[in-house]
Image (tube, grey):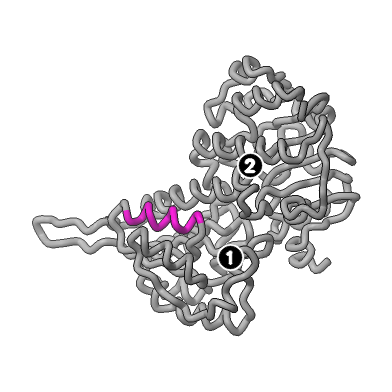
Amino acid sequence: MKFQGMTIGVPMEIMHGERRVSATPDTVKKMVGEGATVLVEEGAGDGAFFPDAAYVEAGGKIIEDVQEIFAKADVILKVKEPLFNKKVNKHEAEMVRDGQYLITFLHPAAPVNHEMMKKLAATGVISITLDGIPRISRAQGMDALTSMSTVAGYKGVLMAANRLAKFMPMVGTAVGVIKPANVLVIGTGVAGLQAVATAKRLGAVVTAVDIRPDAREQSTSLGAKCFDVGVPADVAIGEGGYAQRLSDEWLSKEREALKPLVKDSDIIILSALIPGKLAPILITGDMVASMAPGSSIVDISIDQGGNCELTEAGEVVVKHGVTIDGTKNIPGMMPTSSTWMFANNVYQLLSFLAKDGKIVLDKSDPIIESTLTTIDKQIVHRGAREAMGL
């Protein structure tokens, strides 16, 4: 059996506001059925409405002390990067151990995570980051980033709309017609397309920007007006059809092209990402200052550094009268749907990695090459090494 003799640990997530969990009773049942022992921290699924009793019924074991899970598990499954656990007065990066596997979203290129990455490497833990899953056909079932981007794009628009001081749709009243809100979506990958669709459903006028022609075309099919910032396709498109990092010259030209759109926007949704690298800064402080007071920005790309110069990771701030939301765990605000998708993605990845009760890493495989983050007490992730100057 695939997981025969393997002990898998599922700790409770400790990030503020995080309600997801890395395994559901259904995925625990599958892992146990394949020979694994699954240790679930007491209350780990409560925030997503998966009670302890359901995990026990699925064959999992409920453990009160999370330190016991870290000490016994061969593999730790998490949703978010390791953080300081106030309950036990220890950082999760200090609870992992040499040769243990950690599978989670690490976002290793983001500056806020660099110290944590150094701690992980020092322990000897073998870490695999879910934000590195390549978008190839055989990896679709493992692609948690796509799953979570779907949630973030939908919820991000609702968050921005909730703060907006005006109607989203056009509204006819006895004293006149109120114009619809202008929504600008920058980056029309999975999150951006979901943001476009949601903003259109709410009645806004939506403009979509992406440096890739195909991505722009997809946004028009959802009813958005498409804007071309003028970056040539051969400069914009990288490996696998993803956006690639632009030179400073082209980035400056893109910002210049965006200025009039930003000024006229009531809501901006930022989701422009470059796989495995820091997100590009597309909205400067001066551009934010040009927006009308009461406008709203949601920076979905914050886990990889953010697209707005003024975004503060994990915070909601007001700058120049504009609310800038840097919430790091937007999918955690829709815990039931996002947990269901995430847990199945993780199960698919673990099934791919496991052979006869052991994890086997074929470093020539593109899935391993792009997700392996620390091994042999070294940071090996290319994007992280680039961002950290290693």
Circle 1 residue: 241
Q: Is residue 214 magenta?
A: no
Asked whether residue 191 appears in the rendered view, the answer is yes
> Of the residues shown, which amino acid type is indicated by label 1?
Gly
Task: Specify the quadrant that holds the C terminus.
Answer: bottom right
Residue 16 drawn at (x, y percent): 60, 41
Look at the image and tell me in which quarter the N terminus lies: top right
Q: Give the left or right position of residue 325, taking residue 59 as reference.
A: left
| Prevailing secondary structure of the magenta residues | helix
Task: In this rendered view, identify the residue nearer to me: 217 or 131.
Answer: 217
- Which is in the foreground here, disc 1 or disc 2? 1
Say which element carries label 2.
Answer: loop
Residue drawn 80% across and 68% down?
389
Binning the other alpha carbons within 10 Å of mark 2 as few (below 14), some (14 to 19) or many (20 upward) gives some
At a point 89% along the width and 41% down the height, the residue shown is 98
User: In the image, which residues are magenta?
Assistant: 190-200
Regarding residue 266, the answer to whether it shows in the image is no
**Image quadrant where residue 241 sits:** bottom right
Asked if disc 1 and disc 2 are in contact, CB closer than 8 Å, the reply is no
**Is 196 a magenta residue?**
yes
Q: Earlier in the sequence, mark 1 or mark 2?
A: 2
Q: Is residue 98 left or right of residue 325?
A: right
SS assignment at label 1? helix
Provide residue 123's location: percent of width, then percent of height. Answer: 88, 45
Q: Which mark is residue 15?
A: 2
